[in-house]
Image (cartoon, helix red, strand yellow):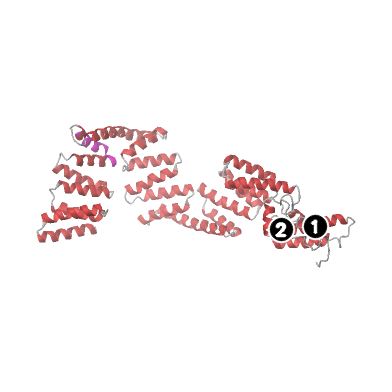
Amino acid sequence: MSVHLVRTLVLLYINTLNGVWSDSVSGHLEKGKKLLQDGNLPEALEQYNLAVAGDPSNYLTYFKRAAVYLALGQAKKSLPDLGKVLELKPDFHQARLERANTNVKLGKVSAAQEDYQILASSENSATEEAKEMLSRSQTVQQYIENIDHLMSKGDYTEDLLHQLQVSIELCPWFPHLRSARAVYYEHTKQYQSAISDIKMLTKLIPDNTEGYYKISSLYYQLGEEEDSLREIRECLKLDQDHKDCYLLYKKLKKLVKQLEAARKMMEEERFEEAIDKLKNALKTESESVAILIKIKTRLCTSHTKISSYDDGMKWCNEVLELDPENIDVLCDKSELYISNEEYEEAIKLYQHTLKINEQFQRAKDGLNRAQNLLKQSQKRDYYKILGVKRNASVKEINKAYRRLAKEWHPDKYDGEDKKKAEKMFYDIAAAKEVLTDKEMRSKFDNGEDPLDPEQQHGGGGHGGFPHGFPFGGGGFTFKFNF
């Protein structure tokens, strides 16, 4: 027995003892009206319950309680009250129209038509609306029959969707139509629309575990693993022993944890750890193409960030096989080409990306960078001068510098071409100057030579060195200890 019903019975008992039926009915109606105006529907319903019990012959009391049921979204409960109203007062046209409209919204089209026909056959305040609704309901009745026929044949055309839309507009609380449209949307790969209809079904059908399982499955197909996990939990709240829901929940819980951990690692630039976590996620997931794309995209990005060319290319290409126009992955692949000094390939791929989305800023910036790097590579490449990779650490750069500086130091050079030694030593010093300075290295990595007077608009320094020649004086004074 519900709490509201118990309270109602208690109040009824008190009123009986006090013998104040007539006074209390008007009091309950007044309280109910005020609570209704304040939006307190459950309390208003209690007052109308008491009023009905106190005066079961008052048709208006039933009508007001029916209005509360409708406001609470309990349309089916309003129908007995509307029926009682018409039993007590058959010419209450507004109640008949309300019953007809409620029935048609619930998909009880034939029952609604009976009331519409009664209203349409005589002159009253509801005649015109009843005539219009009768005509619409007759059309929808034909549509409903046709919908079932088309779907049984697998005929998922635009005409079918039109008939579904028109029918649901008139019968929004009819589960059969919502379910049919969800099937249509799923069949035509409009998964978000299918989810919207099934969510409505979970409200229309109590304890709808299959609805929650379906929503979760669709989110899973879309690669929305967190939304999928949320919906599958709703299924288990209704039935913790639901086998399908539990199996999907177990998998999703593990997957969400793995992907969230990988995401945080990538944010913290712990890319090697993220790669390990993402590979574990691939062991968990093998079915949802969207989730596989998500995992492999992150593997592609993580390898790109650490300039891991071969592995990065492997993951980027696997994503592009599934999603050829994935512009983020196309840019990651272009970055890998740049890290491997394949500038012309990077330029081609950035141009291809911009054909897909000409407004994609990352591709615009990347193309500009790749073009600058190509020009730069035809001039002086500081990484090549020192013989280090583009992702070399400062420690690696300093080590390479010391080794080469010792080899090409003009005072220690054994060869005959001292001019060559001086030039090489100068270039080695310039490379070290640029690549150990964070700001200058960043400029160089973006295709700009910070020691090129033309690119720096005639900036100061000695011979292109912004901080002056690193060895003092206006020329070489080779006094170094190695």
- What amino acid type should be assigned to the residue bearing mark 2? Leu
Start-end of magenta stretch: 103-118
Distance (Cα) linking label 2 and label 1: 14 Å
Residue 426 tag number: 1
Residue 410 tag number: none
Is residue 104 found inside the magenta-colored segment of the image?
Answer: yes
Name the residue at 16% across, 42% down: 86
- In the rendered image, residue 178, in percent from the top left (x then y), is placed at 35, 42
Q: Is residue 185 left or right of residue 24?
A: right
- In the rendered image, residue 268, in percent from the top left (x then y), is placed at 57, 60
Name the residue at 18% across, 48% down: 62
Q: Residue 176 or 388: which is nearer the viewer?
A: 388
- What amino acid type should be assigned to the residue bearing mark 1? Tyr
Is residue 337 found inside the magenta-colored segment of the image?
Answer: no
Question: Nearer the N terminus, badge 2 or badge 1?
Answer: 1
Q: Is residue 165 visible?
A: yes
